[in-house]
Structure formats: C-alpha cells, structure tokens
Image (cartoon, grey):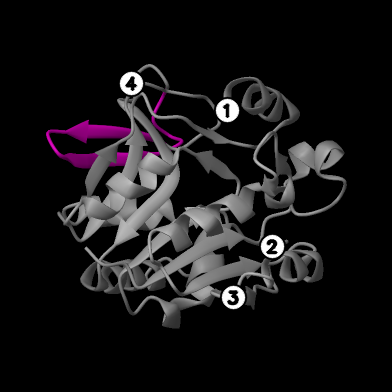
Amino acid sequence: MRISKAIILAAGIGRRIKKLSSNKPKCLIRIPKKKTSIIGRQIKLLTRNKIKDILVITGYKSNILKKEVSKYKNVRVGYYPNYKLTNNLNTLLYFKNELNSSLICLFADVVFDKKILDNLIKKNKDIVATIDTGKSLKDTMRVKVKKERLIDIGSHISTKNADGNFIGVCKFSKKGSKILKKNLLSLKKNYEDYYTVAIKKMIKNKQPVNFFDCKSMYWKEIDTVEDYKELKKNFY
C-alpha cells in the first residue's frame, strides 16, 4: 500500500524526562551512535519509505522543534495550542482535516527498528496497529488480540491479561483515516486520553482493526531516564 502522509504527534511536555532533555521537546533527544534525534530518525525512515508529506504536530517548545525539523524538505509543522490541557486525542482531532488520505501516525518519542516500518506498510488493511506480543509493560498501551485482529487496547488492560503492547505506530488507509476522524469527533470532549480510545471505540463498533506483530524487532518508547539508559545500552 502506498502511504501518502505521516503525522508525528510531538506536542507533549515529557515531564518525566526533562532532566535529560534539557527542557527541549523530548523527541529531540539524541540517539546514541546514530548521530540524529529520535524524531530526526523517524523522519529519515519515513522518507526512506517514499512518504513525501510529513506533518509534525508541535506544542511544548514549538519554536525549538520547528527549527530542528524544518531542515527536512518534506516536513510541515503544525502547532497545537492546548497541549498543556489535553492529551493527544485532541491534538490529532485539532488537525482533523489532515485525516483525508492514507497515513502513518506515530508517537514522537518512539525509537524502532527500520524493519518495523517496512513491514507495517506492506500490510494491506484499512487500520493496522503495530504491536509487540513479546512484551506487556507497565505505563503503556496494552492490547488484547484474537486471530489477526485487536479486540481491545488501552492502559486499562492489566499486564497479566495483556497479549502485548501497542508501540505507538499505526497505519490507516484513506478509508481508515475517515473512520479515525469520525471516531475522534465523537470523542471530542475527552481531554484526558490518547487517540487510542478512538481505536477502542472502533473495535467496540465491530470495525476491523488489524495488527502487525513486531515481536523480536527492537523498539523503545523514551519516557524516562531509565528508558534512555536502556536505549543507549541495547540499540545500535
């Protein structure tokens, strides 16, 4: 499937890692041995997969992030003014008019093996979440699966009962983007949650949500100093 667009959600403050990020957006933390930042590597991988329209949604320290990502010719920058008051459901909803084509949606703080994106794009389904059935981690979006589909997603799923983790990277066809937009609009008064609650609602309404299992491939969400230490030790 050809992907027309990518949306990187980069508006958050990242309070738990401010010591390391030096009050910059945490997606600008440098990846050891890669000579680039977390978001810089994401942009390079998206470009490598011939995605020519990349929207970075900023909020916290927007001017710093805009300066850093604007050096990439295929990047646009959007600003979400209410980043202090809401979670990324409303961040994405603020840019609802962008949900009009096939796209990849990414959390800006995730480092992942390039093979993950390569394989995700090959999945010819309307909505495909990237999950790892080899992990069930605290403080993350966990999932339940049945056969080739998600049957639940969210932090409400206990680590004991989860079948894996959502890694923060999801693909939508043009049709899938329209379905996402519809469900986000129905949740517009939800200021606290991640946009994954829209995916949960799709599942409840019998909308098929497929997945790509990246088990055995490296990924790491960088939320804390400890996460960064693990990245520094294990990612090359």
Element at badge 4? loop
Looking at the image, do the residues carrying marks 2 and 4 touch, with CB atoms under 8 Å apart?
no
Element at badge 2? loop
Quadrant where the image shows the N terminus: bottom left
Q: Earlier in the sequence, mark 3 or mark 4?
A: 3
Q: Nearer the viewer, mark 1 or mark 4?
A: 1
Task: Name the residue carrying label 2.
Answer: 85
Q: Main secondary structure of the magenta part?
A: strand
Identify the amino acid type marked 3. Answer: Lys
- The residues tagged by marks 3 and 1 sit, at their Cα atoms, a distance apart of 27 Å
Q: Nearer the viewer, mark 3 or mark 4?
A: 3
Q: Residue furthest bottom?
A: 97
Quadrant where the image shows the C terminus: top right
Identify the amino acid type marked 1. Answer: Phe
Query: Which mark, residue 73?
Result: 3
Mark 3 neighbour class, 10 Å CA radius: few under 14, some 14 to 19, many 20 or more? few
Q: Earlier in the sequence, mark 2 or mark 1?
A: 2
Query: Which mark, residue 235?
Result: 1
Magenta-highlighted residues? 142-158
- Locate residue 110, reporting x and y percent: 55, 43
Q: Residue furthest left?
A: 147
- The residues tagged by marks 2 and 1 sit, at their Cα atoms, a distance apart of 34 Å
Mark 2 neighbour class, 10 Å CA radius: few under 14, some 14 to 19, many 20 or more? few
